[in-house]
């Protein structure tokens, strides 16, 4: 598994590490720990290409010095995180990198270059206001990356507490990809997946007509039976949850009620009955959840960034 783990000087590596240790990641992986200094470095080799006033040359040199200092701080943060992650995952290959660039675009581009299977990007705080304003970096990465993205938040549980996951299921290919991602991970014993199917009655009535409730119930039962079997085969404990209401609200409420470690969702839903759950709400869930959120992109959607 190839990982790109984005860190910054503000949040420190401890929060990201605590989440990674509860993410079911494999014992062996290649990880790049990246810290991006949000600066532009003026090119000093161009100063002599044409005459310029001394004050302008001095200003450019000062700006470059400040930029280099920011890059050095970013490199220090990346190295500290790399050392901490390496100690926690001794069989991983972990390297630290620092760049001067726009953070979101640098993360997306570097993830493409290293062929990352998963981007991990942190959120500084668990406060409701900050989550609603999750803002530029995390949301830009989520919308523009061509691979799965994990919005990492410090877990509320103790390190040795059982892991509780919330997974959305709506029958779409991307929801299936999220479940397969869960099933493929290396979870500790006792991990529980709360499999949530939120049925929007308005959408169901439009898709199925007057027999919406009966047909919808049969569809949900068949869907959950298949999904439960997949997850149980991976050694996970599964707790199916069927609720009626707005999908994003149901998922967020269930995660809050269960004090979940992470919500897993597909990047896209489908139309009609198969859009009863996710639709295009994954970015809203990522912004508002109290816990980590992993938005999984299926293989067939890898070449189409922005599918959230």
Image: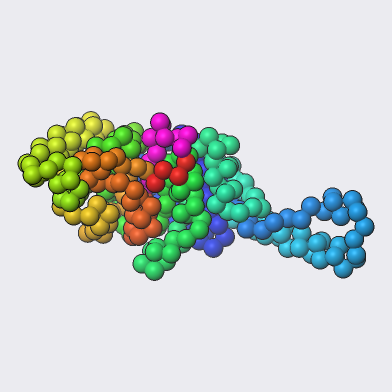
Q: Is residue 51 left or right of residue 24?
A: right
Q: Give coordinates of residue 209: x percent, y percent.
A: 12, 43
Q: Residue at x 47, y 60 (%)?
A: 135
Q: Residue at x 28, y 37 (%)?
A: 172
> Could you say which quadrant of the image residue 123 lies in?
bottom left
Display colour scheme? rainbow
Q: Is residue 194 magenta?
A: no
Q: Is residue 146 left or right of residue 272?
A: right
Q: Nearer the viewer, residue 68 or 147?
A: 147
Q: Is residue 52 left or right of residue 103?
A: right
Q: Give coordinates of residue 24: x percent, y percent.
A: 36, 41
Q: Nearer the viewer, residue 85 or 104?
A: 104
Q: Give coordinates of residue 231: x percent, y percent.
A: 24, 35
Q: Give coordinates of residue 89: x percent, y percent.
A: 47, 42
Q: Is residue 27 left or right of residue 264?
A: right
Residues drawn in magenta? 294-304
Q: Nearer the viewer, residue 292 or 221?
A: 221
Q: Residue at x 14, y 37 (%)?
A: 219
């Amino acid at each position: 598994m190839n990982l790109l783990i984005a860190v910054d000087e503000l949040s420190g590596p401890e929060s990201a590490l605590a989440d990674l240790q509860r993410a079911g990641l494999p014992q062996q992986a290649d990880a790049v720990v990246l810290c991006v200094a949000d600066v532009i470095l003026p090119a000093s080799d161009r100063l002599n290409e044409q005459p310029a006033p001394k004050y302008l040359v001095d200003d450019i040199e000062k700006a470059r010095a400040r930029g280099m200092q920011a890059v050095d701080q970013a490199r220090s943060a990346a190295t500290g995180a790399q050392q901490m992650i390496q100690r926690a995952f001794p069989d991983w290959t972990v390297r630290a990198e620092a760049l001067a660039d726009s953070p979101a675009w640098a993360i997306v581009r570097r993830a493409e270059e290293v062929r990352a299977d998963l981007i991990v990007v942190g959120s500084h705080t668990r406060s409701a206001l900050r989550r609603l304003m999750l803002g530029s970096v995390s949301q830009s990465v989520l919308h523009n990356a061509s691979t799965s993205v994990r919005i990492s938040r410090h877990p509320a549980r103790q390190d040795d507490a059982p892991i509780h996951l919330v997974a959305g299921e709506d029958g779409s290919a991307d929801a299936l990809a999220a479940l397969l991602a869960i099933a493929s991970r290396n979870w500790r014993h006792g991990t529980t997946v709360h499999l949530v199917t939120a049925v929007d009655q308005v959408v169901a009535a439009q898709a199925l007509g007057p027999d919406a409730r009966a047909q919808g119930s049969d569809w949900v039962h068949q869907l959950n039976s298949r999904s439960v079997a997949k997850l149980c085969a991976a050694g996970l404990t599964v707790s199916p949850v069927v609720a009626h209401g707005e999908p994003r609200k149901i998922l967020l409420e269930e995660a809050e009620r269960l004090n979940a470690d992470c919500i897993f969702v597909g990047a896209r839903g489908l139309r009609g009955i198969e859009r009863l759950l996710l639709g295009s709400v994954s970015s809203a869930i990522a912004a508002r959840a109290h816990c980590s959120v992993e938005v999984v992109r299926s293989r067939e959607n890898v070449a189409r960034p922005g599918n959230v």
